[in-house]
Amino acid sequence: MSPPAGIEEHDAVQVLDHLVRRAATIGASDIHIEPKRDGIRVRCRVDGVMVGQGVLPLELGPPLTSRVKVLGRMDMTERRLPQDGQFQLDLGGPAINLRASTFPGIHGETLVLRLLMGSSMIPLERLGIEPKDFTKVRRLADRPTGLIICCGPTGSGKTSTLYSLIRVMNTAELSIVTLEDPIEVEFPEITQGQTNPRQGFTFATGLRAILRQDPDVILVGEMRDAETAQIALQASLTGHLVLSTLHTSNAIETVARLVDLGAESWIVANSLLAVVAQRLVRVLCQECAEPYELGADLSDEDGLILMEAGTPLKMPRGCAKCHDTGYRGRCGIFEVLEIDDEIRELIKQRAAAKDYRAAVHAAGLLPLREAGLNKAKLGVTSLEEVLRVT
């Protein structure tokens, strides 16, 4: 990659604007600016996958990094320690909020910019939740008390799901307060707070303060430690609906993790309403996707057949409209575990994972992989994509 025509190579201001504008145009979530021996490699994460954008001259590195540090209110003189900041760019359309992170590498500081596109909020009904599970989730949003956990790896859309839940709530009659790191989307009708660990404003201290603000609904961006988890659980028992996220892989693991964080098992059992596990899969470009039939039965680790040979599916091909990737956009696949009396008893007994699995199977829980395979059968995504993320 070279700077756009008419832009001097040393003009870091215009180069940064160009990179961010291009990333927003192609729907990227992150920009990676990585100094290497022979140039600065630029890559964007599009639909969860890294896509190369070319190479910039090495001499652009220092001024580009300095420009980001100025905007993000970071220490320009510090090059040996990682830093992070946040800023906004107005490039002619909707303002683009960016979260910046620097990391000292062998050839210079690596920059990662995350685009926080508030205008791309997705309504709850368009997230990709199966109809049966959607009814559960919509009902949960109307509960007055309890804890709802959204889990999955980084970048799986957990915060977007919680935002979508808030959007279906009656914000005029409820006091909704959030504690986030960072605030990714601004809601004019609710109170939003952003943690600042440097000043001692952590999730735990912020959550204590929120409880003095007379809230009905509390959104905690992430349960990062035992203290935050225990305060959130107590809040959900004392007349508040609490929404939060955990970095766990599935619903059963999330239940076990809450107990492992040091909370009393009876508190977890009585406060937990539901766990929503999720992943994001790329959506096939319908302009170029090719139909085919599965050649052999697809089985899981236990030999159970998940999909029979001959099942009609679609595969990615690639065209100009999807930048030759075969995919355009992403949608969610979800595993929704609503806590019933049987699972509450298992939590109180600190049961083993196999006991939870038997209980949720008997209750008809749709696992993540099966939800993904349903999307593949409908031609929404490819079988390879489902197997990649589940």
Image (tube, rainbow, N blue to C red):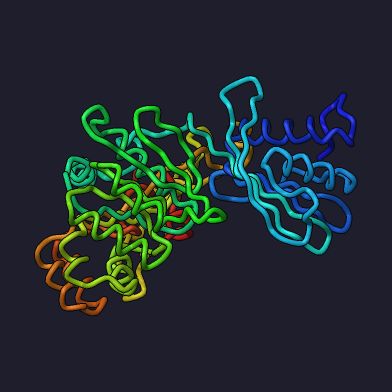
The residue drawn where x is 43% and y is 62% is 224
User: Residue 340, can we see it?
Assistant: yes
- 348 over 336 or under it: above or below: below
The image quarter in which residue 246 lies: bottom left
* Residue 14 relative to residue 119: left or right: right
The residue drawn where x is 60% and y is 39% is 98
Q: Position of residue 145 (x, y in %)?
A: 18, 49
**306 and 216: which one is in front?**
216
Question: For the view shown, which residue lies furthest in the top direction?
Answer: 92
Q: Quadrant of the N terminus?
A: top right
Total marks in image:
0
Q: Position of residue 263 (x, y in %)?
A: 27, 70
The residue drawn where x is 59% and y is 31% is 96
User: Residue 312, can we see it?
Assistant: no
Q: Position of residue 289 (x, y in %)?
A: 50, 40
* Residue 265 relative to residue 369: left or right: left
Q: Quadrant of the C terminus?
A: bottom left
Question: For the view shown, which residue lies furthest in the left direction?
Answer: 341
* Residue 317 relative to residue 136: left or right: right
The residue drawn where x is 46% and y is 36% is 185
**343 and 176: which one is in front?**
176
Q: Position of residue 311 (x, y in %)?
A: 35, 53
- 219 over 108 or under it: above or below: above
- 181 over 340 or under it: above or below: above
